[in-house]
């Protein structure tokens, strides 16, 4: 742990409750810390430096006492930054671990409600600057320590605001045309023009003066919002291509948090488009302003944090895999990646055997290419998750309901779903493994289609669990059928 004059009493007593009694015995002025209300209020802004002043002792003396108590009670090493060390100088020399400790303390205080301006000043004094990789490591650490992704998502705008000045002074590494990040940035450029046009149109129709022009502007807003909605393909590519690669490098938290934000933006698109079919001008203006705010904020998160961090972390081979799968999912705004950047030959995905063999099945033997063709042409989508809860296969059909790409192979299934539904997937798989259930069935309306989904537990002849088969089908046509149509009438 890193202990400085700016560490708050609330943080210390929350992390190490025994300090409440220890500090009271050490200095009678700290008896008031036994009051929970005081710890939750004054304690949030009272630093070690301020506490030392209230107790009429030197800051260094109090730092040494607190460090000694923590080490004696927990055995945990404590690093002290003496008050005579200039914080600006220290921040430049601090190790990565020290910086992350300071950042974690600041973010936890932010989540606990400490005033933003106070923490902004503390950040500037103790850290000063921050890299995208450090932000990603910070989020991963918080998730590993039990903070839900949804909680981080709720505060991520404040996180971005806290780090904004430090990040905006950094330049993102240049990438050649055709590199996956180059394509993401081109999509962002197109989308930024659309959000700017929506803002300009909203400004024209806001207030009483805009009431007369509203009938003419609403059609324009519908068209612009529909065009902007294509950015969602960009999000799907991140979820199915970029995030799995980060997970291979033990960095799952940033993707999970960002996926939650993607879902929020998708909801805002649906809400905005629904309202545009009404006459509620004020609600439409409010909804579309919120939508473009969130979309623009996502640009900043990507360009200041996600993309620079990914370029630092991922290898050329990783980017080659990403580029291959990107084509399977598609691109926003009909953007076509440039051909200047070529994926490394070693990153061409799953190796194909030179000789095509046969597959022995329980009721026959078929060439591998025939088995693959059968699976890809079934009128359903198939995905298989092995007994280790990792995705092992999906049918690469032309009529896929949900997007998939080769990057999903080997990915833990819990990372293939938004955080809010992961617990249900986990429950289903656990029930299958225990033999409590062998099937889970769902159906939903999606984009004017009726989608039927089944999870099926697969077992061998001895009853041992092999994995879960997911079967999805667009059943819209089937539901519309009536009467009969016999074989002789097939034409």
Image: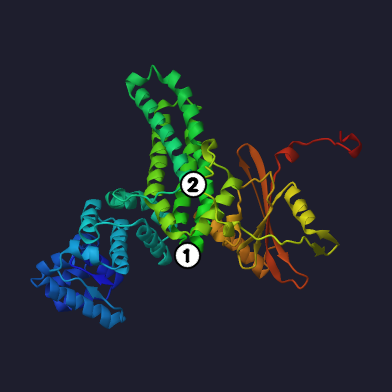
Residue 380 position, x and y percent, is 72, 48
Dot 2: what SS?
Answer: helix
Q: Is residue 395 visible?
A: yes
Identified at 9% across, 73% down, the residue is: 57
Give whichever of discs 2 and 1 has the lower sequence position. Answer: 1
Q: Quadrant of the C terminus?
A: top right
Colour mapping used in the image: rainbow
In the image: residue 31, left or right of residue 417: left
Would you identify the image quadrant in which residue 435 lies?
bottom right
Residue highlighted by disc 1: 250
In-front residue for pair 180/66: 180
Residue 366 position, x and y percent, is 83, 59
Identified at 20% across, 59% down, the residue is: 125
Residue 127 position, x and y percent, is 25, 60
Instruction: Give the class, few, some or many, for how many residues have Cα within 10 Å of label 1's Cα (few <14, many ≥20).
Output: few
In the image: residue 381, left or right of residue 213: right
Q: Quadrant of the N terminus?
A: bottom left
Name, please, the residue furthest toward the left.
56
In the image: residue 285, left or right of residue 32: right
Name, please, the residue furthest toward the top.
212
Identified at 40% across, 56% down, the residue is: 309
Separation of disc 2 and disc 1 at Cα? Answer: 23 Å
Which mark's residue is nearer the viewer, 2 or 1?
A: 1
Q: Is residue 218 above or below residue 77?
A: above
How many marks can you see?
Answer: 2
Residue 406 position, x and y percent, is 61, 55
In the image: residue 234, left or right of residue 400: left
Instruction: Give the class, few, some or many, for how many residues have Cα within 10 Å of label 2's Cα (few <14, many ≥20).
Output: some
Residue highlighted by disc 2: 263
């Amino acid at each position: 742990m890193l202990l400085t004059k700016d560490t708050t009493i609330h943080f210390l007593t929350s992390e190490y409750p025994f300090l409440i009694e220890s500090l009271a015995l050490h200095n009678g002025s700290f008896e008031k810390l036994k009051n929970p209300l005081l710890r939750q209020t004054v304690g949030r802004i009272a630093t070690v430096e301020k506490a030392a002043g209230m107790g009429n002792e030197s800051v260094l003396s109090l730092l040494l006492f607190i460090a000694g108590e923590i080490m004696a009670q927990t055995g945990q090493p404590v690093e002290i930054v003496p008050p005579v060390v200039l914080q600006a100088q220290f921040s430049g020399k601090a190790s990565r671990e020290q910086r992350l400790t300071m950042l974690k303390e600041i973010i936890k205080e932010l989540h606990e409600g400490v005033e933003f301006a106070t923490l902004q000043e503390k950040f500037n004094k103790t850290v000063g600057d921050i890299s995208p990789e450090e932000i990603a490591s910070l989020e991963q650490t918080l998730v590993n320590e039990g903070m839900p992704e949804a909680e981080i998502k709720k505060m991520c705008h404040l996180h971005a605001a806290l780090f904004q000045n430090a990040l905006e002074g950094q330049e993102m590494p240049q990438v050649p045309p055709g590199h996956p990040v180059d394509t993401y940035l081109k999509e962002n450029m197109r989308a930024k023009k659309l959000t700017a046009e929506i803002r300009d149109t909203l400004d024209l129709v806001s207030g009483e003066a805009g009431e007369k022009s509203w009938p003419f502007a609403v059609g324009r807003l519908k068209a612009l919002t529909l065009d902007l909605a294509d950015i969602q393909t960009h999000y799907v590519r991140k979820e199915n291509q970029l995030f799995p690669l980060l997970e291979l490098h033990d960095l799952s938290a940033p993707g999970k948090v960002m996926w939650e934000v993607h879902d929020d933006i998708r909801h805002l698109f649906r809400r905005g488009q629904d309202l545009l079919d009404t006459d509620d001008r004020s609600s439409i203006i409010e909804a579309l302003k919120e939508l473009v705010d969130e979309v623009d904020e996502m640009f900043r998160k990507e360009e200041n944090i996600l993309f620079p961090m990914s370029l630092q972390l991922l290898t050329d081979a990783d980017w080659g895999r990403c580029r291959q799968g990107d084509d399977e999912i598609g691109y926003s705004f009909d953007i076509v990646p440039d051909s200047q950047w070529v994926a490394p030959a070693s990153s061409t995905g799953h190796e194909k055997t030179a000789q095509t063999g046969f597959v022995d099945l329980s009721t026959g033997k078929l060439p591998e290419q025939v088995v693959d063709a059968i699976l890809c042409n079934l009128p359903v989508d198939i995905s298989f998750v092995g007994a280790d809860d990792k995705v092992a296969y999906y049918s690469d059909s032309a009529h896929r309901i949900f997007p998939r790409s080769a990057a999903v192979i080997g990915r833990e299934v819990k990372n293939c779903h938004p955080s809010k539904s992961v617990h249900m997937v986990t429950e289903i798989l656990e029930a299958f493994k225990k033999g409590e259930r062998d099937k889970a069935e769902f159906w939903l309306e999606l984009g004017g289609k009726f989608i039927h989904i089944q999870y099926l537990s697969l077992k061998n002849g001895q009853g041992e669990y092999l994995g879960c088969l997911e079967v999805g089908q667009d059943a819209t046509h089937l539901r519309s059928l009536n009467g009969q149509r016999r074989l002789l009438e097939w034409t």
